[in-house]
Image (cartoon, grey):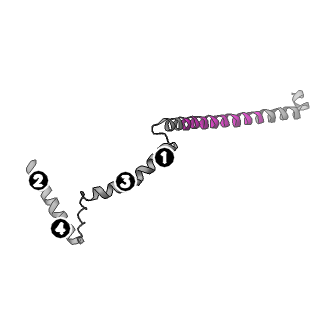
Amino acid sequence: MTWLKRNLFLVIGGAVAVALLCGAGFILWSQKQRADGVTVELDGLITEYQTLTGRDPFPNQENIDATKMSRRASPVCWRTAGGTLSPPPPTPTIDSATFKEILENTIAELEKEAERSA
C-alpha cells in the first residue's frame, strides 16, 4: 500500500496509457471493418465491370457506329411500315354518370354469372 502511495502518478499514468491503448485498438478495429466492407464493395464493382466489358457486343467504336446507322434507318422502316399499320382507335370520352352506370351494370352481370356458375 505504501508503494502505491509513493508511486501514485506512475499508477495513474499507467492506467491512462492502458485506456488510451484500448481506445486506439477499438478505433483500429472499427476502421479495419470499414476497410473490409469497402474492399468487398470494390470487388463487386470490379466483377460487374469485367462482366460488362466481356459482353458481346462490346462498346467499341465499331459497335457504336453500327448503332448510329441502325438509328438512322429506323425512321425509314417506320415510314414503310406505317402504311400497313392502322392508327389506334380514339379514346371515348364519357362523363362520370355514364361511367358509373356502365360500371354498375358490369358488376351486376359479373355477379349473375358467378351465381350461375356456382
Residue identifier under label 3: 74
Circle 2 residue: 113
| Image position, residue 97 (x, y; %) | 21, 71
Residue displayed at 21% across by 67% down: 99
- Foreground mark, 3 or 4, reads 3
Q: Residue furthest right?
A: 6
Q: How many angstroms separate mark 3 from mark 4 (CA)?
A: 45 Å
Residue of label 4: 101
- At 91% from the left edge and 31% from the top edge, which residue is drawn? 6
Secondary structure under tag 4 reads helix
Going from the N terminus, do you reach mark 2 or mark 3 first?
3
Q: Which x, y percent locates residue 114?
A: 12, 51
Pair 2/3: label in front: 3
Residue range in magenta is 20-46
Mark 3 nearby-residue class (10 Å; few <14, some 14–19, many ≥20)? few
Q: Mark 1 — residue?
A: 64
Determine the CA span between mark 2 and mark 3: 48 Å
Query: Which residue is more in the foreground, 70 or 19?
Result: 70
Q: Is residue 67 above or below residue 80?
A: above
Q: Earlier in the sequence, mark 3 or mark 4?
A: 3
The residue depicted at 14 percent of the width and 55 percent of the height is 110
